[in-house]
Image (spheres, helix red, strand yellow):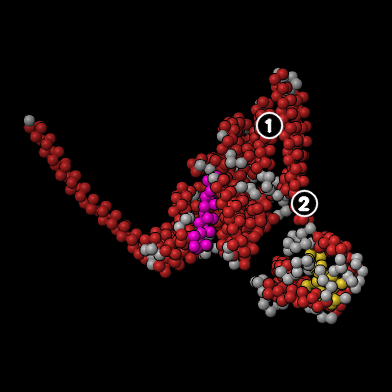
Amino acid sequence: MIKQNNNSHVKLFNRTLIKLLVLPLFLFVSTFALANDTSLNSTLNKLDFKTTQSLVNNIRANKLDYLINQQKLTQAFEISKERNWSTLHLEAAALYAELLFRQEEYDALNTHISNYINNKKVLKQNDIYMLFLEAQLKYLSQTKKLTQAKDLAIHLEEKIAQHSSKEKIIILRALAYYYTDTDSLRKTLSAALAGLELAMKDDDMASQAYFLRKVADAYNFLNDRGVNDGKAVYYAKKAVEAYEKTNDGLFTAKAYWSLGSVLLETNNPQDALIYLNKALHYFKKVSMKKGLAFAQYSIANIQYKQGNYDTAITLANENIELARAAGIHDMHLASMILLADIYIKQNLLDKANQINDKVFLNIDKFSRSIYKAEFLGKRYELKRQLNYIDDAFEAIGSKLIYTKKHYEATSESNIKTLQVKFEVKEKEDKILQLEYEKNINELQVKEEHQQKIIWRLSASIAFILVIVSLFLFYRQIRQRKKYHTIALTDYLTNSLNRRGVMQIADNLLANKPASIAIVDLDYFKNINDQFGHDTGDLVLIKFAQAAKNTLGENDTFGRYGGEEWLFVLDTLDKQEISNTFENLALILSEYCREIEALPSKINITFSVGVAISNTHSKSLDALIKHADQQLYKAKENGRNQIAIA
C-alpha cells in the first residue's frame, strides 16, 4: 500500500514537471512561428506595386534569373493576386508558368495553365496569352502528349501572321522547342532563323540566344549524320556569347552544355570540359537534377575518352543513381552504356556484359529508336567478343529494325541528312555483309538451327535494306522539285542566284522583249574593309529585301556575283526603268539605317547599266554585254547613277 502511494506521487510529480517544461517550449515555438509569419508578411508588404512591376519587368527582360529569384517571383505572383493588380498579376502568372516549367513541376504547371488559359482578360492581352500558349506547348511536348502538342503547334502556325513582332518571337520560340523535340530538322531551322531575324530587329538578346542555340542544335543533329561543316560550333558559340549578355542563368548553362557537347563531338575535349563544368556549376547551384545528369554524363564521357577510367567510372556510377532518382530514363541507360564501354576498354568483359544485359532488359525505356539501334550495335560487338553468337545476331537484327523505325520517324528531316546517312549506311552494309560471310564460315560446324538463324537473319537484312532503299528513293522523287528550287537560290540573301535569274531571263526573252539591268553596289569593298564582312553581308541582305519590295509583279532579280545583281524588267520604257531604280535607292537607304554597325553618315548607293531588248539583240548574252558596258559608263561618270542603252 505504501509502495502504491509512492508511485502515485511520482507520477503526479512527472506530469507537473512535463507541463512546466512544455509550456515555455510551446510559447517559444509559437513566438518563432509568429515571427516568421510576420517576417514573410513584412517581405510581401515591401512588394508595393512599383517594386512588383519592376521585378516582373526585369525577369521578363532576362535581367534577373528565374531560378535564383524564384521566391521573389512567387511572392510577386501571390501578392499581385491578393491585391487585385489585375494586369500585373496576369503578367506575373505567365512568368510563374515559365518558372514552374524550369523547376520541372509539370503537374503544377498543368494546373496553373488551366486556371488562366481561358481567362477573358488573358485572351485580350495577346502577348500574355502567347506566353501561356508557349508554356502549354512546352508542357505538352515534355510530357509526351503528342496529339495535343501537334494540334496546338498547327494552331500557332496558322495564326502567326496575325500577331505583332514580339508575339511572333514568342510563338517561334515555342515552335522551335516543339520542332526540336519532334526531330523536325527543317522546321526547327526555319522557325529558329525566322525568330532570330525578328529578335535582332527587336534587340531581344535572350531570344536571339535561344534561336542561335536551336540552330546550333539542328546543325549538331546534322553532324551526327556525317555533315560536319563547323556550323554547329559557330552557332553554339554565338548562342553562348548572346546568353552571357543576359542574366538567364539556366539557359546560359544549357548553352554551355550545348557548346560543350558540340566541341566533344568535334574532338575538342579540353575546350568542351571548360563549358561543361560551367554548366555543371549552375545546375548544382539550383539543384536541377536533369541538367546535372546531362552535364555530368558528358564530363564522364570526356574522362573516358581521355583514358581516365577510374574517374569516369566514379562519375558514371554517380550519374546512374542521379538519373534513376530523377526518372530520366535515356540518361540513366546512357550512363550504364558508358560504364559498360569503360569496362570493355579495361577488358572486363564479364562486367560489361552484366551491365549490357541490364540495359537490354530496359530497352523499351529509351525514348527514341536511334538510341535503341546504337545500343544494339554495341551489344552486337560485345556479344561477338564473348562468342555469344545467338545473342549477337539477335542484336544486329533488332538494330536494323530500329534503324528503319528511326528513318520512318524522322522522314520530315532534311533530305540531305537522309542522303548522307544512306551513303554511310551503304558502306556499313558492305562491311557488315563481309562480317556475316566470315561468321557463316566459322559457324558451319555448329548445329543446324544456328544455320537457319543465319539464313533468316540474312533474308531479313536484305528485306530491310530494300525497304530502306525504296523509302529513300521515294523521298528523293517527292522532294526533287523542292531541292531544284533550292539549287537556284542564293543562300545568303534568299534571292535567286546567277543560274536561277539567268534561267528566268532566258525564258522571258524567248516569249517577248524585256530590259536587262546589271546593278553594282558602289565602293562595296570599302564597306567590307572598314566594317567587316558581317556588315557587308547585312548590306547585301538589305539590298535583296529592298529589291523585293520595289519591283513589279512581273519583274525579277538575282545575285549575279559578289555585289553585282542582274535585273529582268518587264518593260521597255526608259522612264519607268529609271523610276524603278530611284525607288530602290530610297528604300535601300532606309533599310540600311537598320544596320547598327553601319554609321548613319554612310549612304549605300549603286550604279546601274541597262540594255533594252528591242534596241539590241534578243540574245541574253548580248543584252548582258550591253548592260555591262552601260554599267561601266555609269561608274566612269561618277557612280550612283543609271545608264540606259
- Magenta: main secondary structure equals helix
The reply, left or right, for residue 22 in relation to residue 552 is left
Q: Magenta includes 143?
A: yes
Q: Which residues are magenta?
A: 123-144
- Would you place residue 29 above or below residue 92 in this image? above
Q: Which mark is residue 598?
A: none
Mark 2 neighbour density, 10 Å: few (under 14) some (14–19) many (20 or more): few
Cα distance between the residues tagged 2 and 1: 35 Å
Give the mark, 2 or 1, whose residue is nearer the N terminus.
1
Amino acid type at circle 2 is Lys
What x and y, as percent, mark residue 205?
A: 58, 64
Q: Which secondary structure lies at badge 2?
A: helix
Residue drawn 29% across the image and 54% down it: 33
Choose top left, top right, bottom left or bottom right for residue 643: bottom right
Kindly indicate whether the residue at mark 1 contacts the one at mark 2 (C-beta within 8 angstroms).
no
Q: Magenta includes 1?
A: no
Residue 310 visible: no
Q: Which secondary structure lies at badge 1?
A: helix
Instruction: Give the foreground label among 2 and 1.
Output: 2
Residue identifier under label 1 = 397
Quarter in which the C terminus is drawn: bottom right
What x and y, as percent, mark residue 3?
A: 10, 32
Residue drawn 91% across the image and 65% down it: 619
Residue identifier under label 2 = 481
Looking at the image, which is closer to me, 430 or 318? 430
Choose top left, top right, bottom left or bottom right for residue 376: top right
What x and y, as percent, mark residue 99?
A: 48, 55
Mark 1 neighbour density, 10 Å: few (under 14) some (14–19) many (20 or more): many
